[in-house]
Image (tube, rainbow, N blue to C red):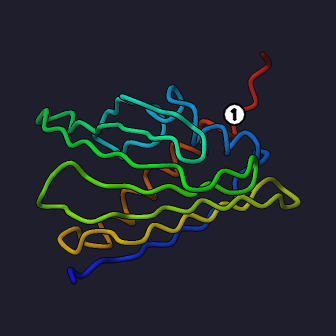
């Protein structure tokens, strides 16, 4: 069995759970906030229902190197919980990861907890943690904005 890592991140965002939930399932939102600094993203497929598949890729802006990944939605509780599998196309990053996003309304917005399990051992957990931190900064900028529509 290959060594894997788990990372857990917790944030409180000034936004309702429903808005954050939508940001995890809307392809246009995903490409805006999910890729860490220095990367762009493309959603190739997103069937946001239990058993539905998704597939996307991140491209390193400076080098143009791209890596694709995808998985299956395992659990969707609107405004509360999302769980999905993840696997990289790269055979050097084998194995299946599982990401669980939990949302809970709190007095000033929403508590967000992200747990990603099964991260391939060749990826340092601190690098994965750093990438998620960068992504969650971008998520906060997207969902906390109060712009009259």
Q: Relative to the observer, which residue lies in front, 71 or 112? A: 71
Q: Quadrant of residue 5?
A: bottom left
Q: Residue 54 placed where, x, y %? A: 43, 39
Q: Residue 59 placed where, x, y %? A: 23, 36
Secondary structure of the residue carrying tag 1 is: loop
Mark 1, residue position? 145
Q: Residue furthest right?
A: 107
Q: Is residue 100 above or below residue 20?
A: below
Q: Residue 108 placed where, x, y %? A: 84, 56
Q: Relative to the observer, which residue lies in front, 45 or 8? A: 45
**Quarter occupied by the N terminus:** bottom left
Q: Quadrant of residue 94?
A: bottom left
Q: Determine whether, in the image, residue 42 is placed left or right of residue 84.
A: left
The residue depicted at 62 percent of the width and 54 percent of the height is 82
The residue depicted at 17 percent of the width and 71 percent of the height is 122
The residue depicted at 49 percent of the width and 36 percent of the height is 30
Q: Determine whether, in the image, residue 41 is placed left or right of residue 34.
A: left
The residue depicted at 76 percent of the width and 56 percent of the height is 110
Q: Residue 8 placed where, x, y %? A: 50, 72
Q: Residue furthest front?
A: 51
Q: Determine whether, in the image, residue 62 is placed left or right of residue 146.
A: left
What is the number of callouts on the image? 1
Q: Determine whether, in the image, residue 123 is placed left or right of residue 84.
A: left
**Quarter occupied by the C terminus:** top right
Characterize the local packing of mark 1: few (<14), some (14-19) or many (20 or more) Cα atoms within 10 angstroms. few
């Amino acid at each position: 069995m290959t060594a894997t890592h788990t990372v857990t991140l917790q944030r409180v965002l000034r936004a309702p759970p429903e808005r954050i939930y939508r940001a995890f399932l809307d392809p246009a939102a995903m490409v805006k906030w999910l890729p860490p600094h220095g990367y762009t993203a493309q959603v190739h497929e997103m069937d946001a229902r239990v058993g539905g598949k998704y597939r996307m890729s991140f491209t390193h802006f400076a080098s143009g190197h791209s890596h694709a990944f995808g998985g299956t939605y395992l659990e969707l509780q609107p405004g509360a919980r999302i769980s999905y599998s993840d696997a990289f196309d790269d055979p050097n990053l084998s194995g299946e990861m599982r990401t669980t996003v939990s949302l809970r309304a709190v007095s000033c917005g929403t508590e967000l907890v992200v747990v990603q399990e099964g991260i391939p051992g060749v990826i340092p957990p601190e690098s994965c943690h750093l990438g998620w931190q960068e992504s969650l900064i971008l998520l906060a900028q997207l969902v906390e904005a109060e712009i009259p529509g």
